[in-house]
Amino acid sequence: MKNYRIAVIPGDGTGPEVVREGLKVLKAVSQKFGFSYETEVFDWGGERYLKTGEVLPENAIQTLKKFDAIYLGAIGHPDVKPGILERGILLKIRFDLDQYINLRPVKLYPGVWTPLRDKGPQDIDFVVIRENTEGLYKGMGEFRDKGTPDEVAIQISYNTRKGIERCIRYAFEFARKRNKKKKLTLCGKTNVLTYAWDLWRRVFNEVAKEYPDIETDYAHVDAICMWMVKNPEWFDVIVTDNMFGDIITDLGAMIQGGMGIAAGGNLNPEGVSMFEPIGGSAPKYTGKNVINPLAAICALSMLLKHIGEEEAGEKIEQAVMWATQNKIKSMSAGKMGMSTSEVGDLIAELVSK
Ligand code: IPM
Ligand code: MN
């Protein structure tokens, strides 16, 4: 029997609640599909930082390397200055484990309300591939004359040919494997950001030659924001840089029904990957048993597909779709018509059948 080692980082706010439901589903689906797993839970997050002053223990990254995958709840605490936990935990793991792909499906499940009145599940089904280790997130820059009226803040977008190429190549492969529209759209800003996007565009065109079966397209990021709302059915796979990917995937989350359902994977195709609901820690709902755990459950589905348990992952996604269609009233916290734990129970029961 296959045995997997999964690192669990419940994190802050509602993170622990949604991860708890995900682990409930994991238990059920592992019994159904006959694989075993061990979890190790890490208490990294805002509470630990406030208590100990330490963001991550020194050996954290080395420790994570021993696992088959990482399951993350949410990072971010209202009492901690913005940036400390995000940079110190989330981005550190992404960067140090070289999780260079951030994979974010934008898929409207049946029965889920979308703000796009005339669009349905057949129209909203694409995937954003966000470069996850470079760009503006690299953290390069400086203050000049800090604190003076002449102060300047410089924030650099750092793009390597190798970093761009591995991301674009992954996107072409992904579009091929996905085998739907077989179309890859590059989302950039070539008309203004003439260094970064010149390089992205050149690498994209070069790599495209190796994939004659994939249709290619380019759109500026601002235009993409329009088309995602007006014509989401145009998209199959979108590839973009770290910052644009961050922004357009929040828009994507909204058109697929909200943060309650949006999941993502931070992938190192050659190493250890991490899966998370993309919604954040939602402090105001903490401990109330009202947050929607489906995003975390969908992240678990992605995790299982990634480590080789495709059928189990697919089973979870099917169960989620059945539940959105038939049982769960809304994707919003407090409006599901069920509690957090009842949703977890329901999906666990569905995957056991
Ligand atoms: C996300 C989040 C993070 C990001 C934050 C929490 C650092 O918004 O995963 O999209 O900007 O990447
Ligand atoms: Mn984001």
Image (cartoon, rainbow, N blue to C red):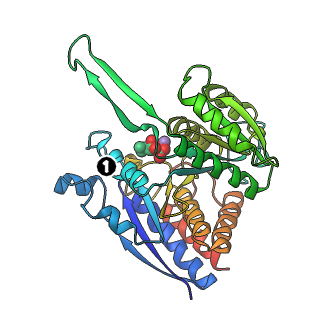
**For mark 1, does the 10 Å Cα neighbourhood hold few (<14), some (14 to 19), or many (20 or more) residues?**
some
* 142 to 129, vertically: above or below: above
Q: Label 1 is placed on what type of residue?
A: Gly
Q: Quadrant of residue 113?
A: top right
Q: As rendered, which of 50 and 342 lies closer to the eye?
A: 50
Residue nearer the viewer, 161 or 148: 161
What is the secondary structure assignment of the residue under circle 1? helix
**Outermost residue, bottom side:** 1
Horizontal side of residue 161 vs 46, given as left or right: right
Residue 302 position by quadrant: bottom right
* Residue depicted at x 46% and y 41%: 134
Q: Nearer the viewer, residue 30 or 131?
A: 131
Residue lying at the far left in this picture: please name it. 52
Query: Percent position (x, y) of residue 198?
Result: 60, 28
Where does residue 264 sit, x and y in percent of width and height?
55, 53
- In which quadrant is the N terminus drawn? bottom right
Residue 335 appears in view? no
Left or right, 213 with respect to 292, comes to right
Q: How far across and how far down the image is residue 186, in percent?
A: 67, 37
Q: Residue at x 57, y 54 (%)?
A: 336
Residue 296 in sight: yes
Q: Judge: label 1 CB < 8 Å from ligand 1.
A: no
In this rendering, is residue 161 above or below 47?
above
Residue at figure coordinates x 55%, y 63% from the top left: 297
The structure residue drawn at horizontal position 22% and vertical position 20%, both measured from the top left corner, is: 146
The image position of residue 312, as x and y in percent, is 64, 74
Image quadrant where one finds the C terminus: bottom right
Say if 176 sits above or below 219 in the image. below
Residue pointed to by mark 1: 88
